[in-house]
Image: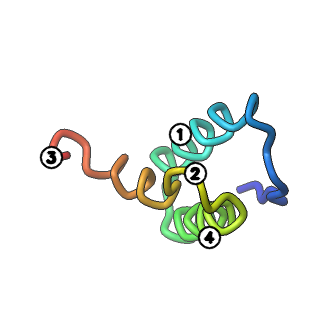
Amino acid sequence: MSLRLISRPSTKNDASYRADLITRYVRADDWAEELNLLAEATRYDKANPGAPSLVDELHGARLGDVA
């Protein structure tokens, strides 16, 4: 498990950061890791209020074909 300090990612790196976080969340194999990634996404959402919700994207990624 790795923790990252969230500052404001640049627009150029924003998409890759989001994709990386979603990938790590989908591949997480225990609930503690999932919780840490959800907390990281929550901090990101608070730091980037104009961006689409990353927490919502994480939850949506778990829905699979249902979504």
Q: Amino acid at mark 2?
A: Ala
| For the residues bearing labels 4 and 1, Cβ distance under 8 angstroms | no
Q: Which one is closest to the eye, mark 1 or mark 2?
A: 2
Query: Going 57% across and 51% down the picture, which residue do you hit?
Result: 51
Q: Secondary structure at mark 4?
A: helix
Q: Which residue is mark 4?
A: 39
3 left or right, relative to 63: right
Q: Which residue is mark 2?
A: 51
Q: Secondary structure at mark 3?
A: helix
Q: Which one is closest to the eye, mark 2 or mark 3?
A: 2
Q: Which residue is mark 3?
A: 66
Q: Amino acid at mark 1?
A: Thr
Which is nearer the N-term, disc 3 or disc 1? 1
Mark 1–mark 2 Cα distance, whole angstroms, equals 19 Å
Q: Is 17 located above or below residue 12 in the figure?
A: below
Using the image as rendered, state which of residue 36 and residue 57 is in the foreground.
Answer: 57
Q: Which residue is mark 1?
A: 23
Q: Amino acid at mark 4?
A: Ala
Q: Secondary structure at mark 2?
A: loop
Q: Which one is closest to the eye, mark 2 or mark 4?
A: 2
Percent from the top left, x then y, of residue 1? Answer: 71, 56
| For the residues bearing labels 2 and 3, Cβ distance under 8 angstroms | no
Mark 3–mark 4 Cα distance, whole angstroms, equals 24 Å
Q: Amino acid at mark 3?
A: Val
Q: How many marks?
A: 4
Query: Going 53% across and 39% down the picture, which residue do you hit?
Result: 23
Mark 2–mark 3 Cα distance, whole angstroms, equals 24 Å
Mark 4–mark 1 Cα distance, whole angstroms, equals 15 Å
- How packed mark 2 is, by other alpha carbons closer than 10 Å (few <14, some 14-19, many 20 or more), is few
Q: Looking at this rendering, what residue extends furthest in the left direction?
A: 66
